[in-house]
Amino acid sequence: MSERAQTTVSSSAGWLKRILPLAIVAGLIALTISQGWHTSLIIAIAENLQSLQAFVAEHRVAAILAYMTLYAVVVTLSLPIASILTPIGAMLIGWLVGGLATVVAATLGATAIFLIAKTSLGEALAARAGPWLGKLRDGFQENALSYLLFLRLVPAFPFWLVNLAPALLGVKLRDYVVGTFFGIIPGTFAYSYAGKGFESVIVAAYGDYEACVTANGADNCTLSLDLTTLVTRDLVIAIAALGVVALIPVIIKKLRAHRRAA
């Protein structure tokens, strides 16, 4: 084999090695969603609510660790049930402990997918970045913590997107972890505190689901949990305002730079 061919094979093997973790995660996401396992999980929790409450009462530490593991996996796989698990955790293990456990688990899960994306795509993207993307990366890296806090605090941005975008924009791991941990605290504890009374929501929703199954069959029914009753519009606005506050250091820095240039 020629030296050029060996280099090509080596390059291809290296690319496959980098992309493999991300491909595995993407495959697990597709499999989970296609099979409806994430929906089945919420139904199983509703079906076994009393048993879960009894287990938590007898094995509190194990229950907290199991919840954190489950939450971290859900975040890593970007499954659309994390917002539902937050009040469920508060209902089962208490809003304060549940909120703290959720923040830690969500940070771990987000960091896992961040590292996978950064290793698989971030370095390759940086090597091929054009002038516009390179400028965007430089600007984001310069104010990474403020931007991350803004993106985490403002509920307009999907959690999974904010997990991935920093990896492609060259954010340092330290900034990502700090920004994620502190940025998700307000929203997480808002959902967690409101989730103290979430049991009645689950019981009512599961009653409607059972009635639907009896009348129409399981394939034609979904368990619908309304989270809008937990967090008010004023609270969402208040959290979003914190996100704007997080941008103040960036605004001040840009104003100073503009004055110096003038």
Image (cartoon, helix red, strand yellow):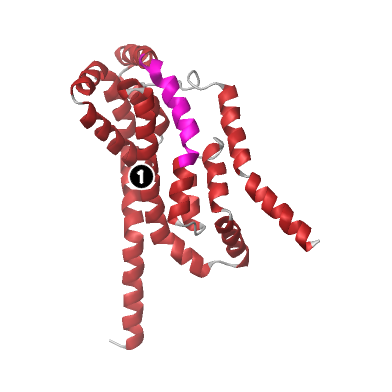
| Predominant SS of the magenta segment | helix
Taking the image as drawn, is residue 189 in sight?
A: yes
Q: Where is residue 84 shown, x and y percent of the image?
A: 40, 27
- x and y percentages locating residue 4 in the rendered image: 36, 85
Relative image position of residue 151 (x, y in whole percent): 55, 43
| Kind of element beneath mark 1 | helix
Left or right: where does residue 167 sit relative to residue 241? left
Does the image show residue 77? Answer: no
Above or below, 233 relative to 32:
above
Q: Magenta segment, which residues? A: 182-199
Compared across the picture, whether 141 is left or right of 40 comes to right
- Residue found 54% across the figure and 43% down from its top: 149
Would you identify the image quadrant in which residue 94 lies? top left
| Residue shown at 40% from the left, 36% from the top | 103
Mark 1 highlights which residue? Answer: 108
Badge 1 density bin: few <14, some 14–19, many ≥20, Cα 10 Å: many
Q: Position of residue 212 (x, y in %)?
A: 35, 14
Instruction: Report if residue 99 lies within the magenta region.
Output: no
Inspect the image, locate mark 1, and give the three-letter code of the amino acid beneath it: Leu
Q: Nearest the camera: 202 or 5?
A: 202
- Report the residue at 49% width, 18% height from top: 229
The residue nearer to you, when weighing 54 against 38, is 54
